[in-house]
Amino acid sequence: MQLSDLAAMVRSKNAGPFVLTFDILFSDEESYLRVKRSGALNVEMFAKLYHTAPSKVRFFECDKALALKFSIPHPTTQGALGSADLHGGQQFIPLLAVQIP
Amino acid sequence: MNECRFIAASGMLGIGVPEDSLRKALETKPHFVAADAGTTDAGPFALGKGVCAFPREAILRDMTILLRNTVPAKIPLLIGSVGTGGADVHVDWFMEIVREVAAAEGLHLRVAEIRSEQSKDFLRQKFREGRIRALDPAPHFDESTIERSVRIVGMMGVEPLQAALETGVDLVVAGRCSDPALFAAMPIMMGLPHGLAWHAGKVVECGASVCEKPSHGMIVGYVRPDEVVIQPIGPGLRCTPQTVAAHSLYENADPFFFTEASGVLDISGTTYEQMEDEISVRMRGSRFRPADQITIKLEGAELVGYQSILIGGVRDPFILGEFDAWLGRVQQRVRESVEKVFGRSLEALNARIDYHAYGLNGVMGNLEADRSHIPHEVGLVVEATASDQKTATALVQLTRQPLLHQPTTKWKGSITGFACLHNPSHIERGPVYTFNVNHVVLPDSPVSMFRTTFTSIEGAAHAIV
């Protein structure tokens, strides 16, 4: 099963102009715990997917929100020349196909 | 019981304040109504150019609905980060709208205008004193950054808002302002717990987007000595413990700790419960740790150049079959052409040309992982950026012939392999800006960087200062 089959919402967004953040939300505790406990989402896999150093990746498990969250320094800075996603809203796509055992 | 009630009238002034929901929410007899009007989300243009990201008509409409309901009821209205950027030019622009509404609606009101733009002299002085510190991550900052900036604003916390509210004004027009501070200012003044007040603000700053299925409506917040209640008002709106807890993730790097000017909001121990009405949520346990040193966050924008673009598409399957190589040859031809015409390279001109191939990797650039299919059509946006508009336009014009006639390995003879959308094929985009500051100032006090003036507006078609 892949992440998009289990998550109620996967999204990315600027958190200010210099940080890009990713939220993975679940609508039930079972799906949340399944993904959380699988360990499939972690700092190392995220760093690889987004071409950044593991030391730059922040990962949060938010039990009350049934959510997992990553934040990284913005790959371009919001609105920088050559960048093409002003709000950072379409950068979550590589997460969708992450395999959840 | 000590209780502060408030209305979060809109997640963003300009997207539409529903008057029916507002009237219903006003039945709770709130102590204030507030809405945020600014963001960096719209990009650096608003701050750089000094314009609002929303149409004036949309702001006028929302302010008309708000003022005609709050002013006669003597309920203070706070609008933060006006005009998107919250600089002085935005405050002036916003005050013109307020005057127009007051005249049209026959309203008499006292207004506090709080300005948050920072002078270059002040910033230079603070930099030399070592009282400007970088956040993480931050671009390089020194005195030349200050020189290059068009505008730098400081983000106020609750204190300048409280000073204005204490005078009993009808309307607070705040320059750049922390969104939750708009909602935390009054409950803290009333002696309610800082942690609950700030967390209430954090939850409601985006209006009804904290609801299960966000739609038109607003939020009423109740801050009490031991709890906050978040109540949505609008057709079909419902908050659940999960939607409220999850909202703290949105557009924040850290979902548990939030740094404000005067300290850190800690919601790691907050509990969320559904209320009996099945649509409201109670929160308890949010804490605020006051900082030893006030920090005022800066936002700045500088001009990076002028831009001209060209839009078109490719449909030829034989070009698409070798698109990367084909575009590589186009780019090489363009570089040669620039050197012939200008006698200098793009780099020497301090210019650049970016190619966005929609249908291939236009949205994600080099982060695009899926290049498994050959699309049947690709849209191309070519962006030339230079230090003046004339050069940017000349550069983008020089891309047209190479795009039109770059051969493909399949066809023998001259081809026209690129479909231009427009005539003329280029569009002048004007100035472009970038955010250039992610730093804080360590000021003397939480109010010292902000300037408040009071104005009385009489509802006739003239204003009396």
Image (cartoon, coloured by chain):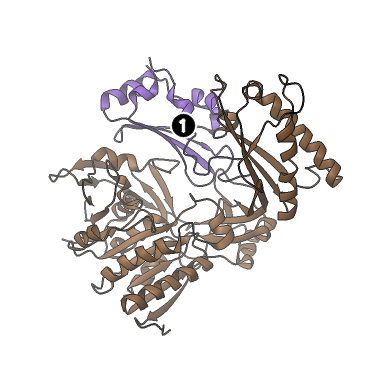
Chain colours: A purple, B brown
Q: Residue at x 74, y 32 (%)?
A: B405
Residue sitting at x 30%, y 23%: A31
Residue B118 visible in the shown view = yes
Tally of numbered discs: 1
Rendering coords of residue B421 (x, y %)? 60, 42
Q: Amino acid at mark 1?
A: Phe
Residue pictured at 62% horizontal, 57% vertical: B130
- Residue B365 screen position, x and y as percent: 59, 32
Q: Secondary structure at mark 1?
A: loop
The 10 Å Cα crowd at callout 1, few under 14, some 14 to 19, many 20 or more, is some
Task: Give left or right: position of B219 versus B350.
Answer: left
Q: Is residue B125 above or below residue B308?
A: below
Please, is residue B307 above or below residue A74 in the view? below
In-front residue for pair B182/B358: B358
Residue named by callout 1: A92
Quadrant showing the N terminus of chain B: bottom left
Q: Of residues B40 and B414, which is closer to you in this image?
A: B414
Q: Is residue B269 visible?
A: no
Q: Residue at x 48, y 65 (%)?
A: B445
Q: Is residue B443 above or below residue B316?
A: below
Spot occupied by residue B98 in the image (x, y as percentages of width and height): 40, 72
The spot of residue B19 in percent (x, y) is: 26, 61
The residue at the far top in this view is A101
